[in-house]
Structure formats: C-alpha cells, structure tokens
Image (cartoon, rainbow, N blue to C red):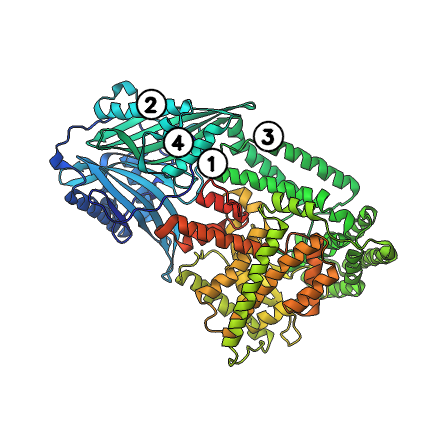
Amino acid sequence: MRAKNPLPCVTAPQCTGPTKILTSSRCAAGRINSFMKKKWAAVSVVAVVLVGIPPTARANSADATSAIREKYKEWLAAYDAKNLAGTINIFAEDAISTFAGAKDAGIEEIRASYKKSLAANGPKRTWKPVEMEIDGDGDLAYALADWQLIETQPDGSGSVRLTNRSVDVLRREGETWKIVRSFTIPADKRPVKLSCEIRLPSISPDKFSGAAADVWQTLMRWRESYNRRDLAGTLAPYDPLITGLYEGNTPDDLAKLRETYTRSFAQTDRQRSIDFEPEEILASGRFAFVRDHWTSTIRTPQGQTQRISRGIELWQKNPAGEWKLLHYLSYLVCETGINAGASSSALDKLAEDFWLWRAKYAPFTGDDVNRIERPGGTRNWSRASIDKQRKDLAAFEARWKKLDATAWPIPQQVDHKLIGSALSRVQWELEINPRWKRDPNFYIEQTLTALVEALTVPPPYDEARSREILARIENIPSILQQGTENLERSPASFATVAINNLDGIREGLRKMASSLVASTTLNPDKLNSACERAADALEKFQQQLKQKLPSLPQQTGLGRDAYIWFLRNVALMPFTPEELLAMAQQEWNRAVTFESYEKNRNKDVPPLKIADNIDNWIKDAAEKELSIRKFLVGRGILSVPDWVQHYTLRPTPEYLRVLGFTETDDFTGPSRLKENCIRYVPEPSEKLGYFWRATAVDPRPITVHEGIPGHYFQLCLSWKHEDPIRRHYYDSGANEGIGFYAEEMMLQAGLFDDSPHTREIIYNFMRLRALRVEVDVKLALGQFTLEQAAKYLQEKVPMDEQTARQEAIAFSTGPGQAITYQIGKLQIMKFLADARMQQGDKFSIRAFHDFVWKNGNVPIALQEWEYLGGIKSEK
C-alpha cells in the first residue's frame, strides 16, 4: 500500500513470542525461488474467502507452526539433493508464484523451472533463510522471510549470489501444509525489469463478502485519506509493528512511513492520487492476504506521470475488531508519462549519449583509477573544439534538467544525481578549473601521459594497438601548438614543473622507441621519425615556457568559492573546507598516536628486509595476493568471485621506465576482465622512494590498496554492474576512499598480525592521507605554495623529497583529489556505523562490503542514502 517509495530499515524480530514464530537460520528452514526469474503466461485469479474456521484449527498452534517449519526443512533437503518431486511437493496444485518483473507462474511452470535449475551444472547452490516469521489462523498461514542463495566453490568457500524477500501463503491440506501463493521481490537492489505489457489479473470488489469485504473497505478508506492528504487517516490502518519493502528501496516501519507521508503531503508543487484494483483476497480467522495492484498519479506543471505497482499485503484483525496492515511487499510494474520516460528510457539514453561523448573528449590525467576505454584517433584541444564541448555540455545539461526525479525510486534518483555530477565535472574542467588555459602540465598529460597510458597495456601490440600508439605520438605537435595558443598567464610554479618534466625528453623518446619497436608492428623509421617530430614540439613548448616564466603570476590557488563548488557539485561531499581540515586533524592525531604505540611495541622486532631481487619480489607478491583472497573469504569480510583475475607485479619495461608521466600500472578495463592486473615495479634497492620501499619489504599494504580488495578488485566489480550508469561513472572519493579504508580494515581484521613492522607502514600511510587533506585544502585556498606543500609532506610524513614534490604537484594542479582518501574512508566508516546501528543483529559485514564494493564508483553519501533509505546523510 505505497504511494511513494519507502524509507529505512526495521530491526529484525527475535525468535520469541507465543503466537508468532520467528526463525533465523538457526531456527527455521528454507525457501524456493530460483524458478521465478522466468517470464510466464498471465494467470487469471479469483477471490477466495475462507471464514468461520473453528478455533481448534488455528494455524498459529504449536503443532501447525512445527509442521510448517518441517515442511520447509523437507524442501531444503530435496533441493540440495536435486530431488525434483520432493522440491515440488511443497506446492499445492493450484499454486501461483509471483516474482517481481515476471509473469505469474502456475504449478507446471514452477515444475519446469525447477527441473532446469536442478539439472544445471556449476557451483553448488543452497537457499539459506536469514529471517522467517510464521503465523496464521485456521487453514491459512504465512511465512515471511529473507532468503540468500549461497554458491559454494570446490574449495569450500561460499558467497551470497543474491537475496530475495518473500511471502508464502500456505493452506492446510489434511495433515500437511502446501504453498498456494508465493510473492517474491529482490532484497539486494537487483533491478526489476519494467513492462507495461504484462497483463495483471483483477476481480470486481463486488464479489467480496465477509472478512474480504471488510478488508477491502479498510483499504478504500486508506485511499480516500491519502488522496485528500489526511495524514491521520492515511496512517490509521497501519499496525504499530508494520514492516514493508518496496523493491529497490529499504524496509519501512511506522515511523518512516509517517515521515514519508508528512514530506509528501507538504509538497505544493504536485498533486498525488492513488487507485487500487484487487486481484485476490484470501481470508481465514484474524488474517487476510491481499494481492492487488495500484496506479499512483503525480501531476506537476510539466505534466503527469503514472506508476503501476503490485504487491501482497498481510492484514491482521486486532482485539478491537479492526483490520490492520502488518506486512507488505511490492514492486514497480510500469511507468508512463513525463517522468516515466525520464526514469527509464530518457535517463538511460542521456547516460548512453553522454558516456560515448565523454570517452571521446575526456582529458587524460595522471590518475590511474579514472582511466577509461576510449575510441582511437587524434585529439583536438583547439578553441573551436573547446567551444563545441561547451555547446555539447549545455545540451546535455538541458536534457538532464528536464528530468524530474523526485518521485523515482531511490536507486534511480541516485543514477540521476550521478549524471548531474558527471556533467558538473565537465563544467569544472572547462570553466571553473580550466587547466586547458592555466596549466601547461595539462598538455603534457594530453600528449605524453596519453602515450604512456597506451603502453601500460602489456605487449605484444597488434596492428590496431600499434597504430594507436603511433597516432598518439604523431598527435603531440598539434596538441602542443593548441596549448600554446590556449594558455593564459599560467601560475609560475605550474610552468616550472612542466619545464622540469620535459628535461631530457628527446633522449627519453629515442630510448622508448628503440626498446618498444620490436613489440609492435610499426616500421622503425616511421616510429623514430614521429618521435623526433614530437621531441621538436616538446622542446619548443619547454622553451616558450622558459621565456614566459619571469612574467608569470605566483598565485596558484583557485579560491574558496571554486573549491566549495567542486565539493558540492562534483564530489557530492557535504563538508566545508574547515570541516575537512578538522576531520583530517583528528585522523592525523590518531595515526601518529597509533604509530607511536606500534613502534614502541615493536622496538625489539628485527626490521623488515627489502626483497633481494625482483623475481623473489614478484613471487612473494603473487603468494600474498592469494593469501589475501583466502583471508577475505575465510573471515567473512568480502565476497571474492572466482571470475576476478589477479593483481600481479612485473618488471618495468625500458620503454616505460624512460618516460614516466603516469602511474605505471594496468587495471585492465570493462572489455578486458579476463586479463590480470599489472603493476610495473623497479629493481629493489635501498634507494627506492616512499611507496616502492614499502612495497619491496611487504607487498601486502599496496596490494590491499591497489589490488585486492582495493582498486583493481573494486573496479572489476563495478565494471560488471548491471546498471550502465554505475559502470561508467567514477568518483575518486569512493574509489580512493575504499582503497584507503581497505588498508585499516585489513589491519583490524588481523591480516598483518604476522608482521609487526607492516602495521607501522599502515599507520604511516594513515599519516600521509590525513596530511593530504590539509595540503589539498590549503593549496586550493592559496594558503600553501607548491614548494611549501612539498616541504610540509617531506617533513611530517616523513617521505623522500622526490615523492613529496610529486604529491604536491599533483594536488596543486588537480584540487579536490587528495582529500578523497581520508574523507572517503571516514564516510565509509560512518556509513558502516549507521548501517550497524540501524540493522542490529541482521547487520552483515560481508553484505555491507559487497554493496559498497559493487557500487564503488558511486559517492559514499549516495551509497548510504540508497542502502539505508531515503534520508540523506548530512555528515
């Protein structure tokens, strides 16, 4: 009975109560649902009214409850044994099964689907009840449960493939109980396919009598109250202990429903109304089971939207003789009107068009996380091309602003906000932080970083890839000429960085070409000639910067207003710069304190040794990567699908070593999920920089952040997301927040218990990430120069001078990125705490992490809103 999408979760009931038997996995048995994903023929349904059952036959007797529980146990055993007859035995011959998004199924469709399911090969699958509530009266009873489908691998590890919530209505048949109606929706945010083609059954309310008529009249009074915005009347039929779930959202209780209706009725810019069509009412004693569908109409100045939803409702008569709604499950069937196109085709089409456009025009950056698969060919950063990007952006924004998402299910509202954020990122790049006209390093990224990014994909390079490598080299002179024309009084420190980065570039390109050519299909002379022309252009660009340097301004910061605009519109972070600094200071204090504890604890422990050679380093990393996978699964921290490949180390090839200009790793991509991730490493030595040295003494801290369960693993899961918007969107606050969160998560879980000094590394990494926030904010607000930021990092982490300067350069030219590690981690920790408190004993750390990792491209604030309900987190 929902007119609008619901809000957060209710606490699961316990296994107590004289008339209500609530069972978890230790006090209940199984469930039946794999057959429900099919598309079946529509089934006509008639009203069945069973009243006047003598008290001696009450379904809530201990014997009845025990019999129903045993029936589910028998079903579980039959399903596990792949016994088709035993599996079907729980169903009555007139059973009807409903799964959200599919047509109703009768007994023959159920049988056929089970036959196919039980004959399937692959990992062993078992249904596991998380919660089951059994109650009833007379010859009818119900079982309300969450069910997890567990896949068990040959090595014995198991993972949750999916979770459903269902209501089964059971009927007494002699000495046994049979399912006559089963209604199921996803409980894990899996999307339901909308269709306006499915014919829904209906029956005239005139056919109802007795209890069925009373329930229907109660429902009609609710409709009248809702349509006239009468809050008291709308809430009147709800039982104080009501629970409900509308597919795609989070569970309701009475408080959340009251808040939803209060907010909805206060909206003056739209009119809402609702109407019902009954499909069936089954009644017995004090319980009634209603199947129905309803049409919600929303009228705004822009037009009208209609949403057809379908549900099952469990009504209970209270001691005063009033029918009260106790439980419901429902889902969206179809949507028409202005918002319907927005919620389905219009938003999806906008996203599809935008991502294709973005792949063509997105600038290259030195960040490895946001690399995307792009079409080949030359790039153009002329003023005409930038003006075209502006016009295209304006057209995308106009389409986006036409979509009114306020009445959409929360997951679709999240998708709408993701596209808004992605559009804001383009505006940030073109107008607010226009590096294309203020930072010469931008053009080094569009030329040399673009080249190196192509080379991080491992060889050999076939004809197509070889052609793309050559195209990127040949594109360098024209892009640099466009850069010279575009740049307007770059900050002197930015120009100095670019000048220094281009020292020795001709020799670097020559060495690159000579070491690369054998791995390509390119003609050596053609490759060398292209590299010489590129070197000419790069040296000319460097010389022009040197000539302009004395007259360039010193100020680098964008200013407070621009920084806050980024936080609000791109990063979707609800913090002020001052709040960011306070959060970072608290984490700095904690990191220094914990590192001090750890160092004192380990003062007599021999230091870690750097790998003695690169082969042993690579072998050690591979063994520890496998151990991390087993640790995650064995400790119930995170599911690890077997299709995810491995995070591996390789020696850095000469053609990468001589260039640099980006992080030398390859996270693969959406079209290369069957390939291993590669991080290219130098020869181990005492002279290694901050991060490389940490990796050479123990590969696990970097593996945890960059590999598994960090970036590579998270990106693979997100690239497989069923929602294309979430596959393409990226946000460093989520990506880097997860990577940093994973470090301390694994420390607290015990991964580094065998290596005391590795724990010191983790705490020192924490110091760095806290300092990054301060450096990022102060650089953006003009409170730090680049040189001051580098010195600050070098002294306070501490870290080597070269790494500190590289960090400061990156943060100065790309404000907003350095905060993402620390602030993203803190947001995840708050998210976890809120989920734990809201879900109580039902909270699962693995289920929580599975959701966060799968949606790891989505800003954490939006993840929490979707996971916990419609109340956005303020901080």
Residue 272 lies, in percent from the top left, at: 46, 25
Disc 1 marks a residue whose amino acid type is Pro
SS for dot 2: helix
Residue assigned mark 3: 402
N-terminal-most mark, 4 or 3: 4
Q: Nearer the viewer, mark 2 or mark 1?
A: 2
Answer whether labels 3 and 1 touch (C-beta < 8 Å): no
Q: CA distance from mark 2 to mark 1?
A: 25 Å
Residue assigned mark 2: 220
Disc 4 marks a residue whose amino acid type is Arg
SS for dot 1: loop
Residue nearest the viewer, comparing 324 with 749? 324
Residue at left offset 77%, top offset 60%: 497
Residue assigned mark 1: 409
Label 3, residues with CA under 10 Å away: few <14, some 14-19, many ≥20: few
Classify residue 541 by image quadrant.
bottom right
- Marker disc for residue 708: none
N-terminal-most mark, 4 or 2: 4
Label 2, residues with CA under 10 Å away: few <14, some 14-19, many ≥20: some
Residue 568 lies, in percent from the top left, at: 61, 44
Residue assigned mark 4: 2
Residue at left offset 40%, top offset 62%: 635
